[in-house]
Amino acid sequence: MSTIRRVVDARTARETIRELTDRKVKLDAVVLDKVAALDALDALHPEEPRADAVDVAYAAGDPDGAHTAALQQLTYEARRQAWHRAQKAASAAVLESVITHRDTIHEQLRTHADKLIARLEAAAAVEDIGLDRLLRDGREQDAKTVADAPWCESELKRLYALRDMRLRRPRETYGTRLVDTGMWRDPRTVRGTTTLLAGLRAGGELWFPTIEDAAAAASPIQAELDAAHQPAPRAGSVAFG
């Protein structure tokens, strides 16, 4: 399974918080403190001094001002770089705090995911005969259920992406080295399908597991795959259990 390469910057940190708060996720006070610290840095961003600030100060008869302006010019690049390092550290602290408190965040996201999965399951239970046929047959509620499926699928995929990118560390996976159970409880059931709705109709089971839940579901599947690829004992050899 592939691992993720996480971008650590203020934009990523703020987008992560926005995506969570947009979904009414209640964040721990520690996370909010880290966000406040990141926001406070904005007011400390060093302003680039004017190139002619020293000349202007001397022209105004202000040698002290000229001295201050010269120091600002000489130290600007060092201050700018230090500010960016501080911002990156503060951004990393925000993202790390989200991961540290991911259990409570995941539970809140799972509430949303379960509702979307239920709506997709309801759509999958309707015969795949097209909206026009459903409406002609007077099945308005079934037609609405099916019509809502693309939006539900899109939003559910966004939840999976948010979970995968923000609630796990780079080398963590939802499953094993060959089996990804982060979306489908048993991915073998949905081979060849291209949408979540098609996967459900093929007998797949969507869920929104934690890393630990996904690993537990993937282990027996991985064991079956390993056994299927185990070479047969050579003639004359003895296989030990």
Image (tube, rainbow, N blue to C red):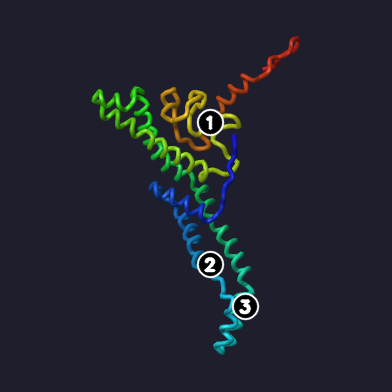
Badge 1: residue crowd in 10 Å (few <14, some 14–19, many ≥20): some
Decide which of tag 3 and tag 1 comes sooner along the chain.
3
Question: Position of 79 compared to 128: left or right?
Answer: right
Task: State the residue in front, 141 or 205.
Answer: 141
Asked where in the image residue 137 lies, by quadrant, the reply is top left
Q: Which-is-in-front pick, marks 3 and 1?
A: 3
Task: Note whether 155 is above or below 74 in the view shown.
Answer: above
How far apart marks 3 and 1 lie (CA) works out to 61 Å
Which amino acid type is marked by label 1?
Ala
Label 3 crowd (10 A; few <14 / some 14-19 / many >=20): few
Residue behind mark 1: 216
Residue 36 at x, y = what percent? 47, 60
Mark earlier in primary sequence (2, 1): 2
Q: Which residue is mark 2?
A: 45
Q: Residue at x 35, y 28 (%)?
A: 123
**Residue neighbourhood size for the residue with mark 2, other residues' Cα within 10 Å, grouped as few (<14), some (14–19), many (≥20):** some
- Badges 2 and 1: C-beta atoms under 8 Å apart? no
Say which residue appears at 50% left-offset and 49% top-offset: 98
Left-right relation of 143 to 61: left
Residue assigned mark 3: 71
| Label 2 vs label 1, nearer the camera | 2
Q: Give the quarter of the figure containing the N terminus.
A: top right
**Residue 236 x, y percent position in the rendering:** 76, 10
User: Of helix, strand and loop, which one carries label 3?
Assistant: helix
**Does dot 1 land on a helix, a strand or a loop?**
helix
Q: Between residues 93 and 69, which one lies in front from this camera angle?
A: 69
Q: Position of residue 45 (x, y in %)?
A: 53, 67
